[in-house]
Image (cartoon, rainbow, N blue to C red):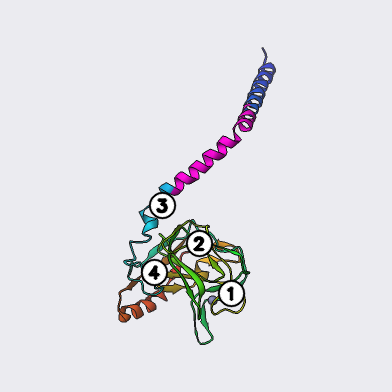
Amino acid sequence: MNLSTIKKTVGIVVFSMVAVSGFAQDIIARQAPSDKRLKDIRNVKLNNTVGISADLNNPAANIYTDWTDNLRSCTGAVPANYKIDLRGFCMPTPSRKINSNFGPRWGRQHEGLDVKVYIGDTIRAAFDGKVRICKYNGGGYGYYIVIRHPNGLETLYGHLSKQIVKKDQVVRAGEPIGLGGNTGKSSGSHLHFETRVLGQPIDPALLFDFEHQDVVSDYFVLQNGISKGSNAQSASASTSNAQGNTRTARR
Ligand SMILES: [Zn+2]
C-alpha cells in the first residue's frame, strides 16, 4: 500500500464516521424531541427551585438591615468601594429613547430616567430580586414597583398601567413585572426608572445604556460607601457621600 492509498482510505473512513454520526444524531433528534423539551422544562423548574436561595428571599442582607414598604427609609451600611455586579441584567424595556435625564428639573431633583414606552408595553425586572414595594401614588409615581436585588441595588419602575407582581414576590431578571403606562404625575406614557442603593438615588445612566441596550460596565463601584441609620443627620451625610459614586471602566 503506497502513501496515496493510505490517505484515501483514511479519508473515506473519516467521511463515513462523520456520515454515520450525523445520521445517528438525526435519528435521535427525530425520535426524542418531546423528551428533550420535557427535560428542558424540568431543568428550568429545578433551576428555579434551587436558585431561590436565601439571597433572593432576603436580598443584599449584607448591607440592608430592614425590609419596609417605604422607599427612602432604608437602614444599613454600604462599605467603601462596594462593587455592584451588573452582570445578569435584563433591560427593563427594549425602548432606546430617553425622554428625560436624571438630575435637576423644574426646580427639583428628577431621581430617575424617563424612557419612552407605550401603554401596555411589557416592563421587565432588571435583575433577579424580591419585590419590596408595590403601591400607587396618585401625585407622583402612579402605579409603581420597587425591587431589591442581591447585588445591593434597588430598581424602581413608575407610571405603570398595571402591576403584575405582588409585594414580597421573588422575581427573575427579565420576568414581566408590569405594563407601561401614564399613571400618577405623568404627561405622556413612559417608564420612570430609578436605581437606588440604601434609598439613595444613583443616576441610572451610569449603570444602564438604554440606547445600546446594555449595561455601561460589568461592575459599578460605590467609592465612598453609604451608611444610613434611622435619624435624619446620618441620612444627609450619606447624601453627600453618594455624590462621589464612580463606575468602573468597561472591560
Ligand atoms: Zn421621571
Mark 2 or mark 4, which has the lower sequence index?
2
Q: CA distance from mark 4 to mark 1?
A: 36 Å
Q: Is residue 38 left or right of residue 53?
A: right
Q: Nearer the viewer, mark 2 or mark 1?
A: 1
Q: Secondary structure at mark 2?
A: loop
The type of residue carrying mark 2 is Ala
**Which residue is found at the position 38% from the left and 52% from the top?**
53
Q: CA distance from mark 2 to mark 3?
A: 17 Å
Q: Of the numbered discs in the image, which one, if any, rests on residue 144?
A: none
Q: CA distance from mark 3 to mark 1?
A: 33 Å
Mark 4 or mark 3, which has the lower sequence index?
3
Mark 4 or mark 1, which has the lower sequence index?
1
Q: Residues within 10 Å of mark 4 (few under 14, many from 20)?
A: some
Q: Which residue is mark 2?
A: 126
Q: Secondary structure at mark 1?
A: loop
Q: Which residue is mark 4?
A: 223
The type of residue carrying mark 3 is Ile
Residues rendered magenta in the picture: 24-48
Q: Which image quadrant for residue 222?
A: bottom left
Q: CA distance from mark 4 to mark 3?
A: 30 Å
**Which residue is found at the position 31% from the left and 81% from the top?**
233
Instruction: Tell me if label 3 and label 1 are in contact, CB under 8 Å.
Output: no
The type of residue carrying mark 1 is Asn
Mark 2 or mark 3, which has the lower sequence index?
3
Instruction: Tell me if label 4 and label 3 are in contact, CB under 8 Å.
Output: no
Q: Which image quadrant for residue 167?
A: bottom left
Q: Which residue is mark 3?
A: 52
